[in-house]
Image (cartoon, grey):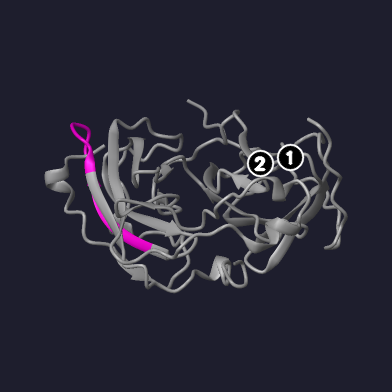
Amino acid sequence: MHRRDLVSLSALALAALTLGAGCPEEPARPAGGAAATSTAVAPAASAEKPSAAPQAADAPKTTGQAAAPEGKGTIKGVVKLTGKPVEMKVPAARKDAPICQDKDVVYDAVVVNDGKLKDTFVRITVGGVQGSWKAPDAHAVIDQKDCMYEPRVQGVVSGQQVDIKNSDRTLHNVHSYKGSETLFNQAQPRGADPLTKTWNDGIIKLTCDIHPWMRGFVVVTDHPFFAVSGDDGSFTIEKVPAGKYKLEAWHSRYGLKTADVTVADDEPAQVTFTYAGTEPEPAENKDELKGLW
């Protein structure tokens, strides 16, 4: 048999159009593995950035094939907050922003229900699963709605296309960062076509210079084994190949936690991540709430 090399294609990001802060707004117009064998440990806080490759002992025991393995395992879990959450309020600047002032939208940096933490991104570490994965054909979607990014946090596979929409009756500008580096800063008037972007790695932060409280995050991973905790703090990662893995949980206010888990094919592995609410802000998102109220 002949060997054929697999070549992965990366999409080029659209050229950035620089827009300075203070652009005018448009006026309003009428309108799985066994839990018993997983030995999942209580996650510990880490000052490290997400995405460190696991040690060889943590790598899953698959067939070693180059193509993506088809797994049958499931990882299920919950993210808890044991301390007092930061109180969320309506950003003060909304009252002075046309269109945005029409709704009192409570900020969403920390959402806790019955001690369960929403919008925590959970994944197997980057490089932690043997095989390679093609970016899905389906586009991920981010919407600017009621002068907020929806969803606030989501994950994509490396190279997956992301469509950024503007459903508001006003001008936004999408200003994206990877760390402290600006990736693009592009105007998006009401009714404009979506901005389509791709990224290969990292935590991408989205802001708006016109409406400085707006904040969203896209976490890019080299495989599809990730999830975001819901309103009840729960998450599920499916079709995981059997093996031992290191998981990481990242919250935009409380940072990174890690846990070890063993996945088998017969029943879900169970994992709990616990935040105290006293963790320092992660390097990717410093001072988000400063001056907001």
Which amino acid, mark 2?
Lys
Mark 1 surroundings: few (<14), some (14-19) or many (≥20) residues within 10 A = some
Do callouts 2 and 1 mark residues in contact (Cβ within 8 Å)? yes
Residue shown at 51%/46% (left/top)?
A: 222
Left or right: 34, with 276 as reference point: left
Residue 168's label in the rendered image is: 1
Between residue 199 and residue 244, name the one nearer to us.
199
**Residue 144 lies in magenta, yes or no?**
no
Disc tally is 2
Where is residue 164 drawn, in percent x and y? 69, 41
Where is residue 218 drawn, in percent x and y? 57, 50
Residue 137's label in the rendered image is: none
Q: Is residue 176 visible?
A: no
Between residue 237 and residue 274, name the one nearer to us.
274
Point out the stretch of residues depicted in magenta: 257-269
Residue shown at 35%/42% (left/top)?
A: 235
Between residue 84 and residue 122, name the one nearer to us.
84
Secondary structure of the residue carrying tag 1 is: loop
Q: Quadrant of residue 71?
A: top left
Q: Is residue 63 visible?
A: yes
Residue 145's label in the rendered image is: 2
Q: Specify which label sits upstream in the sequence, 2 or 1.
A: 2
Where is residue 214 drawn, in percent x and y? 65, 55
